[in-house]
Image (tube, helix red, strand yellow):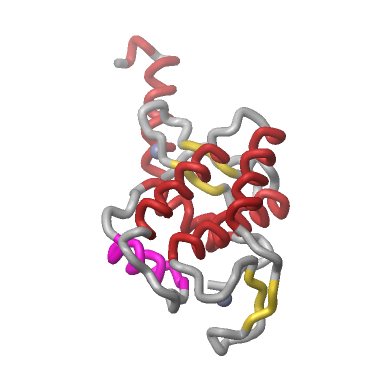
């Protein structure tokens, strides 16, 4: 997974992992690979609690009350999780930037990748483009990569559910 200018793959991986937290490091590795991440460094059981801590910090970015708070929380993640940028061609498919040391354990790698990917997403597409589903009992997180930037639901299913509910609320006799 290379960081594209909009950080889309990395921020989507963060949302996917936050919405369904991995229960073992093997599951984490499988899901990272399925998302296109080259996991070539070491991984141990210690990476799992590390990744949960990274996702806790990331969800705090999602749940920030406003843009300034969101930026401040993400800046803390970047300060703790990234190193100076460097060029690498480690995967043999082209030079790209890493914001981390080489050969980091998986937890630390994800800390850097998720922090930088989220930063690129927010500054590239808009600071408001992280959120939780508008259906009250659904707290699924999403990164809004739509053209209009007005996404409100995690899925079409939740959008339909809310539309039915709003229709019923405005036509009480039809219930
Ligand atoms: Zn790379
Ligand atoms: Zn939902």
Q: Residue at x 47, y 31 (%)?
A: 134
175 to the left or right of 81 = left
Q: Position of residue 15 (x, y in %)?
A: 46, 50
Q: Nearer the viewer, residue 2 or 102?
A: 102
Q: Residue at x 38, y 60 (%)?
A: 47
Q: Position of residue 97 (x, y in %)?
A: 67, 73
Range drawn in magenta: 25-37
Is 26 colored magenta in this rendering? yes
Picture quarter with ligand 1: bottom right
- The vertical placement of 94 against 114, above or below, is below
Q: Residue at x 65, y 63 (%)?
A: 83
Q: Position of residue 88 (x, y in %)?
A: 64, 81
Which SS type dominates the magenta stretch?
A: helix
- As drawn, the residue found furthest toward the top would be 173
169 to the left or right of 91 = left
Q: Nearer the viewer, residue 164 or 2?
A: 2
Q: Position of residue 2 (x, y in %)?
A: 58, 72
Q: Nearer the viewer, residue 71 or 142?
A: 71
- The vertical placement of 141 against 40, above or below, is above
Q: Residue at x 71, y 34 (%)?
A: 68
96 to the left or right of 32 = right
- The vertical placement of 136 against 62, above or below, is above
Instruction: Using the rendered view, name the quadrant where residue 149 is placed.
Output: top right
- Quadrant for the C terminus in the image: top left
- The vertical placement of 32 against 70, above or below, is below
Q: Nearer the viewer, residue 82 or 155?
A: 82
How many labels, in total?
0
Is 59 colored magenta in this rendering? no
Instruction: Using the rendered view, name the quadrant where residue 94 is placed.
Output: bottom right
């Amino acid at each position: 997974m290379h960081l594209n200018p909009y950080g889309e793959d990395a921020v989507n991986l963060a949302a996917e992992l936050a919405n369904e937290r991995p229960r073992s490091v093997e599951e984490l590795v499988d899901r990272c690979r399925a998302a296109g991440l080259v996991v070539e460094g070491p991984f141990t059981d210690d990476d799992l609690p590390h990744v949960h801590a990274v996702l806790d910090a990331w969800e705090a970015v999602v749940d920030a009350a406003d843009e300034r708070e969101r930026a401040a929380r993400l800046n803390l993640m970047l300060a703790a999780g990234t190193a100076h940028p460097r060029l690498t061609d480690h995967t043999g498919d082209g030079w790209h930037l890493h914001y981390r040391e080489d050969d980091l354990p998986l937890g630390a790698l994800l800390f850097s990748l998720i922090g930088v990917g989220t930063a690129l997403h927010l500054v590239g597409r808009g600071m408001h483009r992280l959120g939780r589903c508008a259906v009250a009992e659904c707290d699924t997180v999403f990164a809004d990569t739509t053209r209009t930037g007005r996404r409100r639901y995690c899925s079409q299913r939740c959008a339909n559910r809310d539309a039915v509910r709003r229709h019923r609320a405005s036509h009480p006799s039809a219930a």
